[in-house]
Amino acid sequence: MLARAVEQGHRERGGVLDMSDLVTLARNPVPNGAVTGMLQSHDGAPLRFARWQASRSPRRGTVCLFGGRTEFIEKYFEAIADLRRRGFAVATLDWRGQGGSVRELRNPRKGHIDDFKTYDQDLMRFMRDIVLPDCPPPYIGMAHSMGGNILLRAAAMPGVWFEKIALSAPMVELNPKSLPPGPKSIVRGVVSAVSRCGGSELYIRGGNDDYGETLPFEVNGDFNTVTTDPERYARNNAIVAAAPKLGLGSPTYGWLRAAFRSMAEIGAPEHQAAIGVPILFAVAGDDPIAHSPAIEDYARRIKLGAAITIPKARHEIIQERDDLRNQFWAAFDAFVGVDGAV
């Protein structure tokens, strides 16, 4: 009843996609014991969440897991199983505008947000309503790309929930290769001008409804932008093929303007100085999306930051081939104090 009532209130948006249940495939089964549902955010927007208890002892608390732009819970089933075997409960959600959460625009394929402060509010509601009442402490934040940007925003808050935070290719700055040609200040100015002049909900130049991971794994001898692992790439394609409503197209000018603003906010010296929680930065050595040198520099600038660079990894380190993603897990285990074979 809650989800239905919320949907009535959001018809001006893209609406609820009726995706509260998780999609299971033979090659990507739902980890057992899942608790799923739709939580209501501060403005009534329905957000899809899921949580699991640890599958092994000793119990170590809860990892709060957050994906990047376009991503959805199903894409992280393997990582969720990895975490549960380490003794962690796991709680996760789909950010608004993607996955099974409410879409912000009439065209549900458009990746849009007006301000990353909205993500802040969604995170607060998720922690208050889902994590704190039902998930065992201590809490560790873990996020990829855009999710990493949002956790870095939260990391400077007084009384932040997380004892530690582990980030995969966090969006602290975009790789210049992923942006239109020209000086960054000019690109930002154009994006801001288009948004102010009524184009906030338009796709960025060259954008469309196509979901990125439906592109071929390899084009002209070069890998896609996200991973060098053909099996995991195909698995993630299969999820969207089975449940097209999970897919998301390109970002809008409004999303990109909001992203530029948020990157500037978390990059400000006063913000970095306010971060008091230990953070592990996993940096992809061959990342065409996030700017790896900027991530390494960010880790050096905060009091309790540490970085590991994984050579040859593309943007989605946790979706990479085993020899690369295992480097991430080794660093994660050392960071959170997991000892012994997993």
Image (cartoon, rainbow, N blue to C red):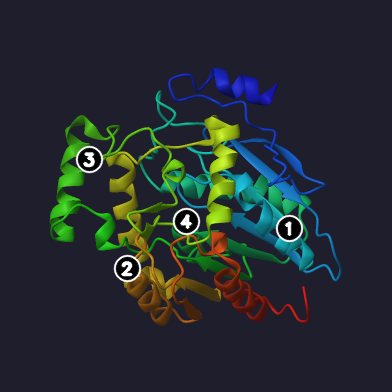
Q: Which numbered tag is attached to residue 205?
A: 3
Q: Which quadrant: the C terminus?
A: bottom right
Q: CA distance from mark 4 to mark 2?
A: 15 Å
Kind of residue at badge 3 = Arg
Residue that mark 1 sits on: 81
Q: Position of residue 142 (x, y in %)?
A: 59, 62
Q: CA distance from mark 4 to mark 1?
A: 24 Å
Q: Is residue 322 visible?
A: yes
Along the polypeptide, which appears first: circle 4 or circle 1?
A: 1
Q: Which numbered tag is attached to residue 150?
A: 4
Kind of residue at badge 2 = Ala
Q: Position of residue 32 (x, y in %)?
A: 81, 47
Along the polypeptide, which appears first: circle 1 or circle 3?
A: 1
**Mark whose residue sits in front, 3 or 2:** 3
Along the polypeptide, which appears first: circle 3 or circle 4?
A: 4
Q: CA distance from mark 1 to mark 3?
A: 38 Å
Q: Is residue 275 visible?
A: no
Determine the secondary structure under disc 2. loop
